[in-house]
Amino acid sequence: MSDQPIFRTIREQVVERLRNDVMGQVFEPGESLREFALAKRYAVSRSPIRDALLQLTQEGLLVATPNCGVKVASRMDDEVQPLVIDIRLRVEKFALDRVMKNVSETALALLRERLDRNHTACREGVLSNIIKSDMDFHEAIVEEGGSEKLIGLWKQVTSSMMLHYERHGDWIESYHEHVAIFEAIERGDRKGAKAALVTNIQ
């Protein structure tokens, strides 16, 4: 796992890699995930695998069923998806309001860095990297304007949406949507930032 930062624990590295593989659709919806096979795939013991399965189950990416093990969560029901989108928008708009009361240079620098990562990912076209960079950009908004509880709620809602990320054939279009959010924040345009947020998330 040399591609992971050396300061991360084995558990954190496994969580990250498994999350990326699930959201990158390496594993199919409903597919069973076995500790032994995952331990072999990531070249680790089964202990960090168990921890990763538990965490991603809590995030909503996986589903644990008694006596049946852990599976990749299924696609959201069409009737449920609008509700999930609405909840996510409410959380991010709430965080955005807080951020824009006093937009700091630190916040702008963080968002700019995440935006650059998204640009690179969209140009390269690797799905797992695109999804991660997309989530990282939005997470920065929630982190800057939220609390731990708000971030926890956001992660659970957003992970279920990102599980089947298929909106764009041209990924650069997605990047430009994030640019619109950032530029509105940068110029202090709260209404424009919220409108750009809605365009990106719908």
Image (cartoon, rainbow, N blue to C red):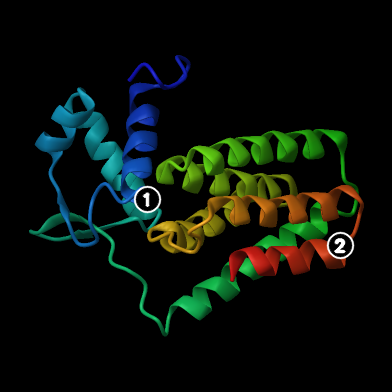
Secondary structure under badge 1? helix
From this view, report whether residue 174 is shown above or below residue 83. above
Q: Which percent across, then down, holds residue 147?
A: 66, 50
Q: Nearer the viewer, residue 51 or 164?
A: 164
Q: Nearer the viewer, residue 25 or 34?
A: 25
Labels 2 and 1: the sequence-earlier one? 1
Q: Residue at x 13, y 61 (%)?
A: 66
Q: Which residue is mark 1?
A: 23
Within-10-Å neighbours for mark 1: few <14, some 14–19, many 20+: many
Q: Is residue 21 left or right of residue 87?
A: left
Q: Which residue is mark 2?
A: 190
Q: Which percent across, then down, holds residue 182?
A: 77, 49
Q: Is residue 147 visible?
A: no
| Rendered-image quadrant of the N terminus | top left
**Amino acid type, mark 1:** Met
Q: Is residue 13 left or right of residue 178?
A: left
Q: Residue at x 64, y 68 (%)?
A: 89
Q: Residue at x 39, y 30 (%)?
A: 12
Q: Nearer the viewer, residue 113 or 63?
A: 113
Q: Which percent across, then down, holds residue 185?
A: 83, 52
Give the spatial CA distance, label 2 vs label 1: 31 Å
**Amino acid type, mark 2:** Arg
